[in-house]
Image (cartoon, grey):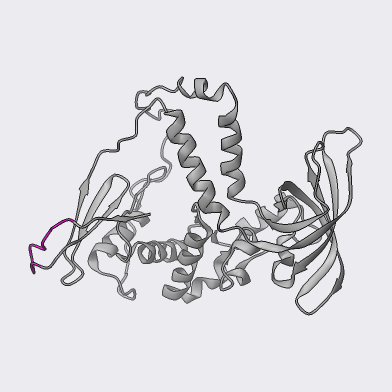
Amino acid sequence: MFRRRAYLNLCPKCLSRLRVFISHNLLFKFCSKCGYFESEYRPTAFTLPVQYQNLYTWLHNELSIASKNLVTLGHARLSDFRPSKDSKIGILRLRVKVHKDYVKSLRPYDSIYYENVLGVIVNFKQLYTSNSYIDGILTLHTQPNISPPNKGRLFTAEPAILYESAIRILNEESAAISLQKFVRIKPLTCTGIRSRVTNLNFSLDLSSYNIDQEKKNIVNDIINLNDLDFLAIEGPPGTGKTTTIAVAVCELVKKGFRVLITSHTNVAIDNALERIIEVCPECRDYIVRLGHPAKISPKIRSFMDSPREDENRMTWILRLFKEKKILV
């Protein structure tokens, strides 16, 4: 999230007012009139050991944001709830009515909320279909000592579940004391692994892409990175970060590489995929999108894949690694 501040800065080229953005430890100044751009590094204010209250407040703020993005898949009524034979898990059966667009969301091993009850999907048995909804029986595994409601909503669990889990850990009596045991460690040097790829020196023709020379240089640097190296791109909105990433992915695929794209938000991933398809339509056949269908852009859902009847989770993933080059 960028915070905008009204600094009285003038562009040295055209004397127009500079737009100022702050992103973590970087300050950016940008002229929307002539394109002048500069950045300034600002050391982070975060220190170790971790302050308990600061972390606790941050987690609650992130949970509040994540909770606003939850997707309601449908509604359910309680059919049966009983513990397993070993009493370690609860087996929850629900009569559900799920919107047609989200039926594929009811996949085994995915997490889902039934009101305030968090469960893991075991299976979904479809009974019949109406105009917009599909009725069926949904079986979940939950904690054995809960009291599930008689009826309620079904909605996606992540990423809110991650913040809730962290908050529960912090609420333990020992958490505040444990956090104080963190100390600043000395820089580590990797001595056990030697880079397997060095001095690639790929020659690139980027003339077909509508990007400026700076972005071409960045793409060239990405393509020629040594094994275990990385390159960070940071800048204010609208400066072409996503386009640069898209061009780099397309060029990597053309060079025979396989690319994994990941982010802390589904929106960022879908935006990157849409840009990849825009700048390189021939890459469409190489893309596979993994994730919860309810959280994926409707434009991208056609790139999703699911296990075949004769595949388990592991053989499915291995097949995707063999068939696809852009895994998201």
Q: Name the spot of residue 210 as percent of width and height, x first.
A: 31, 75
Q: Is residue 177 left or right of residue 121?
A: left
- At a point 54% along the width and 25% down the height, the residue shown is 175
Q: Is residue 68 among what the camera can see?
A: yes
Question: On the rendered image, what quadrant is the N terminus found in?
Answer: bottom left
> Where is residue 251 shown, x and y percent of the image?
41, 64
Q: Nearer the viewer, residue 284 or 242?
A: 242
Figure check: 145 above or below 76 = above
Identify the image quadrant of residue 102: bottom right
Residue at 61% x, 38% y is 165
Q: Which residues are magenta?
A: 7-15
The residue drawn where x is 11% and y is 63% is 11
Give the left or right position of residue 85, taking residue 151 as reference.
right
Query: Which quarter of the figure has residue 291?
Result: bottom right
- Counting from the top left corner in percent of width and height, residue 138 is at 83, 57
Nearer to the camera, 31 or 247: 31
From what the image shows, is residue 141 above or below residue 247? Answer: above
Is 125 covered by the magenta stretch? no
Residue at the far front: name it: 150
Toward the viewer: 109 or 205?
Answer: 109
Quadrant in the picture for residue 324: bottom right
Q: Nearer the viewer, residue 166 or 221?
A: 166
Q: Is residue 191 above or below residue 315?
A: above
